[in-house]
Structure formats: structure tokens, C-alpha cells
């Protein structure tokens, strides 16, 4: 496999369930690192709490496994202190969208140069299957035994509206796109967000009678439509589908730590009084 | 010779922090701490440091830990409700042994209370606010000058012991203006002994050492563990590294204690009224004294114990319903009577009322 240098092989086997998508997402992140030739001695991987958040422990680089929902806030401190480091956040959908929702929109708004990969399994895995803000309406969860009544977040639209300058979505089935999107995100200068649908056969799959992990991957294949396809479809056809693709990319938005360092430089040059 | 200056408590905190090499501040505005953020917003970028106003106090504490691990001396400042929000990540700093300073300029609580009047209601929150057993160091200034010196010391201790250090100020101390002559920073050097094996050296991000940092109980390599033996050793070492240094961490002031029969034990702004009351009592021929605590945690057990041995009664005046008095009683261990005196109506305890209390016991 490419990118083995990024893996802490001594930490394997990993703790995810058999058939869990999180390993596939991590594999894609590793291949993306390899694709861009990331210097692992100048990179920090940050996560919150959840099954997905254990991913940082398998990466052979500086790693910070923080508190539930707060990965982006910790990462903001790191990036602002050391703008020269590549900071990558790996976190679950519950972690990023529920408890950490505020940090997510504000990291996007600042357009701080962090790459954020959302492992979206549509459920809380680590706490055994409660619903998340990304659980599809109608799906079952241990706290939605009659089917989820709430509407799900479209997290890509949320972060794009909040100001993220790179936004993409893929799935564990569409692995080549996933690798490419993460690679582009890592090369991007502002806040880059990649959502990856990742199957949780143990809780989402079982609770919704979806069959084995392979069936879940097939479900992703059937449910996903590309951006181009989606543009030709009417809302009725799009119901229950998930749109994948690169939604937004803008290198022109000022990146926060650069703006801050510019201010430091201006002040050092004596150019500014209050 | 440094010039005397008229300075506010919160400004003294900023001066102390910059003196100690502060380079990163993340915060969220809350009175009566906000001046600290405002001054640092102006000054940090001028010294190549960073200031950021985060979306809330939780995020601020998180950013401070991140920045500290990335190599910058870091601090946040807040008041009661914000301090409550920081607690989870304060525990995270303790478990990951991340040096940082948290300033809490106390105000009336619980909840929004009576904004933004003085109180001392966060004494136990500072000790036990986060969940689980964890080390804490809490300093409590009673003057503008001491806000400066204790801030400098807070950073030294944070670095040395790799702990979050809390500077527990209050509204009166934070907003009061006094004439101060800032001491030569050399004099402030706490000159602590290295902690030996108790505190492993901190490896920062970006040094190429590929460190793992986690809030889970972890082994020496930094990786999570579920081994009960490793877990037990880990948490005991964490708490012991501070407990073992209690002597050096303990800062108290002794006033008229040689022959004192009635002793006030006070901290923060109330200690100023206490000293005045003791002086008035002395003028009246009463054998009164004051033990002023500048370190609240680890609790100065021995100091209280020795004063208790010579006194007949100790009075603990507090702007809360009695948070530290229990600790004083515990340390006194029955050697003398211990009584509390409380005020929770948002008013500072005055010297004359303490004089009445001194005369009443
Ligand atoms: C403050 C706090 N609240 C709740 C929890 C419990 N908790 C741990 S992980 C988790 C949800 C994880 O779900 P998600 O982020 O979707 O990740 P997954 O496990 O599905 O990969 C929760 C609620 C916690 N650790 N901390
Ligand atoms: S519970 Fe779900 S998300 Fe967690 S490891 Fe198992 S399959 Fe993966």
C-alpha cells in the first residue's frame, strides 16, 4: 500500500468493528497524504471523541485526541501558534455537527487553514447508536426507536454558507474521489471540509436492517448522485439521494493565520498605531 | 529604578503575563475580566504573539491547550460562568500535562447572578470544577501588585509542573487601581527545583518527534491504555507531582501572629479588609492576627495547622457561604475553634464589620 510511512503499524490492529467504514476513510486520508507528499514531521492530526476520532492514533505524526466536539477549537490554537504546520482534523458527524457545531461554523467563517474530514456514519457509533444531526429523517437509532423525526443537516451546505473555501463530499464506496478530495483539501490554503459517508454496520446498519457492510456500500453507490447528475434532477427525484462531488473551491478568500501574520509584520514595521 | 504607576488589577495581570513570556491568548468577553482580553488584543501582535477571540469559553480553553502544545506560552481569562464552561478542557489540560494559565476574575453566582459584582464563589469550582481526580494549583491575589507577581509565578509553575494554573482574582482586585512599582522580574524568578521523574519533559508539536497526546489515561508513550495498573500509576503521579510541591507552592502572609489569640484567615480582596480590621483591633489592645492565603490550592495545610495551635479562635470571612472555612477547619483539626463569616449580597466585607466579628467571638 502507498503511504505506509504515515501509519503507526505497531498500533495495529485498529479498534474499529469488522466492516466499519472508518478504516476506509483513514486509508483514503493516508493515500491523500502520500499523493501530495505530506511532510509528516510538519503535520498535526487532531480529533475529538468518537469511533472516528481514534483515527489520529494510527497516524505516524504529531497527534492530539481531544474532548468531544472540540477538535477544531484545539486545532485553531495549534494552527494560529504554528501556521507553518499542516493541521488536519478527523472527526465524526456527531462530534462536528452536534456538540461541535459552533466551532465548525466559526472555523469555516475564519477560513483558517485547517483540513477537516468528517466521518459521516449518520449515527453515534461510540455511544452505541443514538441519532446524530446527520441521521437521515426516518432512519432508526436507539434514541429514535420509531424513526428519526428531525431533518438532517446538509453539512456541506452549512460550512459553505459559513465561509469554508473548499467543500466536497464523497463516500467510502467512491474511494478514488475521496482520496482526490482529501488531497486537494490538504493542498488548499483556507478552511477545507470533506465529508465522507462511512458505514457503521454495527449500529446504523443493524438498527436499520441494511444487511452486511457490502450491502451498505452498495447502498452508497445507489444513493449517491454526482453534482452534474443532481443538476439535471428535480427535487422529487433527489429525495433520499445524497449528492457527492466538489461543491466549492475558492483560493481567493483570505486565510486567517496569514491575515494575522500580516498584521504582526505590519506592526513590526512600525506601520500601525492604534 | 522602575517608575511608580497607577495601574488596574487586570492590567497588572496583562503586564505579568507578558513579562512571563505570554505569546498566545484566546478568550471570550465577560465582565469583570474583559480588560485583559482587550489589552492583549492590542499588545500581543506587537510582540509577535497571537490573540484570538473565540466563539465561546470552551473553544478558548481548547485553543489555549492547542497553542501551548504547539510551543507558545498561553493563557485565557474569564469570570464565573465562563470558568464553568472551561472545566472540561481544564481537566483535559491537567490530564495531558499541558502548561497554561487560566485567569478567573470572580463575580457573583451561581448563574448570571448579579452582574458583575464581587464574590468569591469559585473557590471550590477552582478545586473540583472538572470531573475526576486531578491536580490543581490556584493562586489568589489581593492587590494590583500581587496580581502582577502571581501571574508571573503562575506561568513559572505551569511550565515547571506542566499543569494548568488558575489565577483566582475577584472583581474588586481586578478593577481596583493602585499605585504600583513593578519589581525587577529577576526577583520574581521562583527558582524551583526540577521535579525529577514526576514531570516528564514536554515535547511540542512540530519538533518531528511524532507525539501522541490524548485525554484518555495513557502510558509513557502517550497512548491510551486500559491497563488498570498503568491507569492507577498515571493518575496518582499526576496528583502527587503537585502535592509533593505543596511547600514551595504555598504563599501566605502572616500579620501579628506571634501572640495572636483571634486570627482571621482571609484571601483575595476580603484580606484587605481583614488586615485593616486586625490593625484596628490591635489599637484597641486586642490580640488579633491575620493569616492571608495567596495560595488556595494545594491548600496550605501546615500553615493553618501551626496558627491554629497558638490561637483560640480562627475566623474565615468569605464572599460566599463558606467555601474555604471547611478546609480551614479540617487543617485546624480541633486545635482551636473555627467560625465562618459570610456575605453574599454582592458587597465587599468591610473592616468595621470584621472588627465587630473579632470583638464578638
Ligand atoms: C461532553 C461529552 N458528551 C458526550 C460524550 C459521549 N460521546 C462520546 S463519542 C459520542 C458520539 C460520537 O459520535 P460521532 O461523532 O458521530 O462519531 P462515531 O463514533 O460515530 O465515529 C458521544 C456522544 C462525551 N465523550 N463527552
Ligand atoms: S460502532 Fe460503528 S462506527 Fe464504531 S467502530 Fe463499530 S462500525 Fe465503526
Image: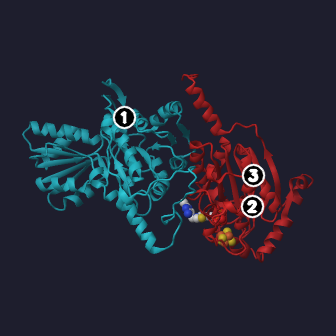
Chain colours: A red, B cyan
Report the residue marked by disc 2: A28
Task: Pinpoint residue B108: horizontal percent, then vertical percent.
Answer: 39, 45
Report the residue marked by disc 1: B9
> Which disc number belongs to residue A36?
3
Query: Separation of disc 3 and disc 2 at Cα?
Result: 12 Å
Q: Observer-nearest residue: B95 or B229?
A: B229
Task: Pinpoint residue B128: horizontal percent, then vertical percent.
Answer: 39, 58
Callout 1 environment at 10 Å: few (<14), some (14 to 19), or many (20+)? many
Q: Chain of mark 2?
A: A
Respond whether the residues carrying marks 2 and 1 are from the same subunit.
Answer: no
Query: Separation of disc 2 and disc 1 at Cα?
Result: 52 Å
Horizontal relation, residue A57 to residue B183: left or right: right
Label 3, ligand 1: CB separation under 8 Å = no
Which residue: 23% across, 61% down?
A: B330
Check contact, mark 1 vs mark 3: CB within 8 A. no
Q: Observer-nearest residue: B20 or B216?
A: B20
Q: Observer-nearest residue: A8 or A76?
A: A8
Q: Secondary structure at mark 3?
A: helix
Which residue: 75% across, 67% down?
A: A138
| Ligand 2 - quadrant of the structure image | bottom right
Query: Dividing the image into 4 quarters, which one contains the N terminus of chain B?
Result: top left
Respond whether the residues carrying marks 1 and 3 are from the same subunit.
Answer: no
Q: Secondary structure at mark 2?
A: helix
Which residue: 41% across, 53% down?
A: B163
Check contact, mark 3 vs mark 2: CB within 8 A. no
Callout 2 environment at 10 Å: few (<14), some (14 to 19), or many (20+)? many
Give the total number of marks visible in the rendering.
3
Please tell me whether residue A42 is drawn above or below residue A201 in the rendered image. above
Closer mark to the observer between disc 2 and disc 1: 2
Respond whether the residues carrying marks 3 and 2 are from the same subunit.
Answer: yes
Closer mark to the observer between disc 3 and disc 2: 3
Visible in this render: residue A145?
no
Amino acid at each position: 500500500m502507498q503511504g505506509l510511512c504515515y501509519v503507526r503499524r505497531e498500533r495495529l490492529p485498529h479498534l474499529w468493528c469488522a466492516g466499519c467504514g472508518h478504516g476506509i476513510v483513514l486509508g483514503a486520508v493516508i493515500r491523500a497524504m502520500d499523493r501530495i507528499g505530506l511532510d509528516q514531521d510538519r503535520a498535526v492530526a487532531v480529533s475529538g471523541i468518537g469511533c472516528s476520532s481514534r483515527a489520529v492514533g494510527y497516524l505516524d505524526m504529531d497527534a492530539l485526541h481531544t474532548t468531544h466536539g472540540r477538535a477544531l477549537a484545539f486545532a485553531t490554537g495549534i494552527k494560529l501558534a504554528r501556521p507553518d504546520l499542516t493541521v488536519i482534523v478527523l472527526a465524526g458527524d456527531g462530534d462536528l455537527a452536534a456538540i461541535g457545531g459552533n466551532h465548525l461554523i466559526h472555523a469555516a467563517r475564519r477560513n483558517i487553514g485547517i483540513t477537516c474530514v468528517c466521518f459521516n456514519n449518520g449515527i453515534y457509533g461510540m455511544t452505541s447508536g443514538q441519532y446524530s444531526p446527520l441521521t437521515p429523517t426516518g432512519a432508526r437509532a436507539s434514541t429514535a426507536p420509531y424513526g428519526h423525526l428531525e431533518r438532517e443537516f446538509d453539512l456541506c451546505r452549512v460550512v459553505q454558507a459559513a465561509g469554508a473555501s473548499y467543500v466536497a463530499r464523497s463516500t467510502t464506496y467512491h474511494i478514488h474521489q475521496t482520496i482526490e478530495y482529501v488531497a486537494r483539501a490538504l493542498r488548499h490554503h483556507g478552511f477545507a471540509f470533506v465529508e465522507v459517508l462511512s458505514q457503521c454496520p454495527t449500529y446504523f446498519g443493524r438498527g436499520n436492517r441494511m444487511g452486511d457492510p457490502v450491502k451498505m456500500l452498495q447502498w452508497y453507490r445507489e444513493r449517491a448522485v454526482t453534482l452534474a447528475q443532481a443538476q439535471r434532477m428535480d427535487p422529487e427525484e433527489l429525495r433520499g439521494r445524497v449528492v457527492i462531488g466538489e461543491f466549492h473551491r475558492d483560493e481567493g478568500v483570505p486565510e486567517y493565520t496569514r491575515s494575522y501574520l500580516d498584521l504582526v509584520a505590519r506592526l513590526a514595521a512600525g506601520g500601525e498605531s492604534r | 529604578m522602575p517608575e511608580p504607576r497607577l495601574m488596574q488589577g487586570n492590567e497588572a495581570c496583562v503586564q505579568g503575563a507578558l513579562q512571563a513570556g505570554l505569546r498566545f491568548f484566546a478568550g471570550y468577553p465577560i465582565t469583570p475580566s474583559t480588560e485583559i482580553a482587550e489589552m492583549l488584543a492590542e499588545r500581543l501582535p506587537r510582540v509577535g504573539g497571537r490573540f484570538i477571540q473565540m466563539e465561546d469559553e470552551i473553544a478558548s480553553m481548547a485553543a489555549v491547550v492547542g497553542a501551548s502544545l504547539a510551543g507558545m506560552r498561553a493563557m485565557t481569562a474569564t469570570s464565573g460562568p465562563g470558568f464553568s464552561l472551561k472545566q472540561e478542557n481544564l481537566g483535559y489540560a491537567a490530564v495531558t500535562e499541558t502548561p497554561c494559565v487560566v485567569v478567573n476574575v470572580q463575580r457573583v453566582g451561581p448563574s448570571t447572578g448579579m452582574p458583575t459584582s464581587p464574590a468569591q464563589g469559585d473557590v471550590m469550582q477552582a478545586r473540583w470544577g472538572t470531573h475526576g481526580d486531578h491536580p490543581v494549583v490556584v493562586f489568589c491575589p489581593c492587590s494590583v501588585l500581587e496580581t502582577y507577581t502571581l501571574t508571573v509565578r503562575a506561568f513559572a509553575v505551569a511550565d515547571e509542573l506542566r499543569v494548568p494554573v488558575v489565577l483566582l482574582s475577584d472583581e474588586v482586585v481586578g478593577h481596583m487601581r493602585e499605585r504600583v512599582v513593578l519589581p525587577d522580574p529577576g526577583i520574581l524568578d521562583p527558582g524551583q527545583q526540577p521535579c525529577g521523574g514526576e514531570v516528564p519533559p514536554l515535547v511540542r508539536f512540530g519538533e518531528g518527534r511524532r507525539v501522541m497526546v490524548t485525554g484518555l489515561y495513557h502510558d509513557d508513550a502517550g497512548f491510551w491504555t486500559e491497563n488498570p495498573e498503568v491507569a492507577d500509576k498515571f493518575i496518582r503521579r499526576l496528583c502527587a507531582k503537585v502535592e509533593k510541591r505543596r511547600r514551595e507552592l504555598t504563599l501566605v502572609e502572616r500579620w501579628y501572629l506571634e501572640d495572636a489569640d483571634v486570627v482571621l484567615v482571609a484571601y483575595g480582596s476580603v484580606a484587605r479588609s481583614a488586615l485593616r480590621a486586625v490593625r484596628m483591633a490591635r489599637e484597641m489592645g486586642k490580640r488579633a492576627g491575620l493569616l492571608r492565603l495567596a495560595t488556595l490550592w494545594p491548600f496550605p495545610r501546615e500553615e493553618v495547622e501551626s496558627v491554629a495551635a497558638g490561637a483560640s479562635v480562627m475566623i474565615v470571612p468569605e464572599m460566599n457561604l463558606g467555601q474555604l472555612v471547611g478546609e480551614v477547619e479540617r487543617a485546624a483539626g480541633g486545635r482551636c475553634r473555627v467560625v465562618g463569616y459570610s456575605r453574599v449580597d454582592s458587597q465587599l466585607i468591610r473592616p468595621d464589620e470584621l472588627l465587630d466579628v473579632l470583638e464578638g467571638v
